Image: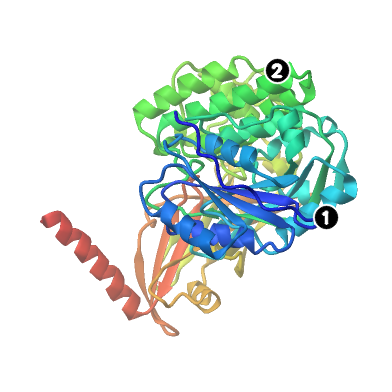
Amino acid sequence: MNEAPEPRPGPALTPSAQVSIVVIAYNDATLVGEAVRSALAQGDAIAEVIAVDDASTDRTGQVLDGLAREHPRLRVIHREDNSGGCGTPRNDGLRAAAGRFVMFLDSDDVLPEGAVDALLAAALRHDTPVTAGLCVRRELPGPREVPWQPDLYRAPALLDPVTAHPELVGDTLCVNKLYDRAFLLDHGILFPDGRFTYEDFVFTSRVLAAAPRLAVVPDEVYVWHVRRSAKKQSISLDRKDVANWEARIEAHRTSVRIFADAGHKGLAHAARTKFLDHDLRMYVRELHTRSADYRQEWWRLTRAYLTGFEESELLAATAPARWLARVLLASGTPVDSDRLTQLAARPGRLLPPYARDGERPVWSSALSEAELDGLDALPTDRLPVTVDAEPVLGSRSLLRLRVHELYGRVAAAGPVGIDVELRRRADGRRGPVHTAALTPDPSGDAWTAETALDLGSLITRGGSGSGTPVPWDLAAQVRCADGSVLHVALRATGPGLRRHALPSARHGLLLAQPYATTGGALALRMASGMRTAWQIAARKLRRGGGRAR
């Protein structure tokens, strides 16, 4: 691999201009300009923006050179060979930086206004080599934003040392932080070079293992763009190949080893617990959608890794994640992918049948080694209760609900009613709440209810008349006689999971499509109007015509 060429000399620093922002790019000509401009727009605190073009084969290099001619604070490094990953170009930018502080930015993301000022002010006030702020995941093209690890960034804080705060291992991002460049170089903290996936896991572990003082600000400092419909998915979204999971395990294993070698047993323990609570659950949620070959190899890799976990690390994980691990360890071959997927959802749903081995609740009679430890002691509102929801759409649209018993815990709470809430996915806007009384099923192991669905009100609230169906998520609260409330997702069931065209006095025509999300929860796509129906029909005809040719 060739060394990156030397960039032109950096700018003369001023007392206010102390930050270098490193932007990395590969074949991202359409987006890199927005990223660079968001960095330059941070104001007087920016000494320079260093854009590293990782040997792009599109117009990325030309776009960056054109911007550099307009903006003196932008320097461009053109690598001769593609590095195969994100680590090497970030290292190139870090070594070339002239600022006292450095920050990293990916070419398809942006920095919000005031991000650098918020981080720099805290870094100077507390004299911290690392300062961190809130990142939000922005779903595009819609306006939906989800904060990343929000509990870490609710209030300003000085964490000294970070080793006393193992919760920090949950934030593996490198981009929502401002680093003292001398601190990184003095401790030899660089990214893994070359084709190393999830390089930020390792970099962040190296930072935490050096035990710096760390300042936290509640300000939004990074916008992570999520483009699920993009032709080329980002690493975090491109999980269909089992090699992605293998790379994630290797990055995680390396991070744990870094903590252990530095003598930080608490951080190593927290990292493994985080792996169960976050990484494992995320991939299990999608397991039922994968091929048999994928599941076989995924199971082998995961089981081999989990074998090295200590019992204390399993016990520190949340109950659903811990139970997933116990099933994997108990079975040498893939089993019960649908049940595992439902349990890995958030909130988790434990599907029947429910088995006991003596007094112990277990996964199944065939896997009695997989104990559902702690289930009997879980607070009622944290029970992974399954609520089936069957949509029946027609002239009068209904939702049929069935709340399952769970080892006697639901009966002990005494379910009496259920409230179903609809929320527009794009922005979290609330739709109507549908309330119904629960009736004990004659079988003695469930409670049932039926409630009307006011689909027309979703159009009014959602403004879904443009021809693009709008997704709505459904969730429920089960009210119990003992005063407890179960917050549950609804499992999609029944034959009604298909597109329906429904007459409407208000809208002429409603198009409603109940469907199961990747995690198996019930959701709705809603649109209105004859124009929308024709657009959908035309798209289907075009697809059919394409197949005929």
Question: Looking at the picture, which amino acid does disc 2 mark?
Answer: Glu
**Looking at the picture, how far across and down is residue 341, in whole percent?**
50, 37
Mark 1 and mark 2 lie on one chain; the one further toward the N terminus is: 1
- According to the picture, the residue beneath numbered tag 2 turns out to be 311
Label 1, residues with CA under 10 Å away: few <14, some 14-19, many ≥20:
some
Of 139 and 208, nearer the camera is 208
The quadrant the N terminus occupies is top left
Residue at coordinates 50% horizontally, 39% vertically from top-left? 5
Of 132 and 233, nearer the camera is 132
Is residue 285 placed above or below 398 in the rendered structure? Answer: above
Give the label on residue 121, or none: 1
Q: Which label lies toward us, 1 or 2?
A: 1
**Looking at the picture, how far across and down is residue 453, in whole percent?**
51, 68
Residue at coordinates 77% horizontally, 28% vertically from top-left? 210
Query: Which colouring convention does the figure follow?
Result: rainbow
**Looking at the picture, how far across and down is residue 405, in whole percent?**
61, 40
Q: Quadrant of residue 515?
A: bottom left
Is residue 391 placed above or below 467 in the rendered structure? Answer: above
| Left or right of 542 in this view: 134 | right
Q: Are marks 1 and 2 in contact (CB under 8 Å)?
A: no
The quadrant the C terminus occupies is bottom left
Q: Is residue 351 visible?
A: no
Q: Residue furthest left?
A: 549
**Looking at the picture, how far across and down is residue 74, in whole percent?**
58, 56
Of 256 and 492, nearer the camera is 256
Secondary structure beneath dot 2 equals helix
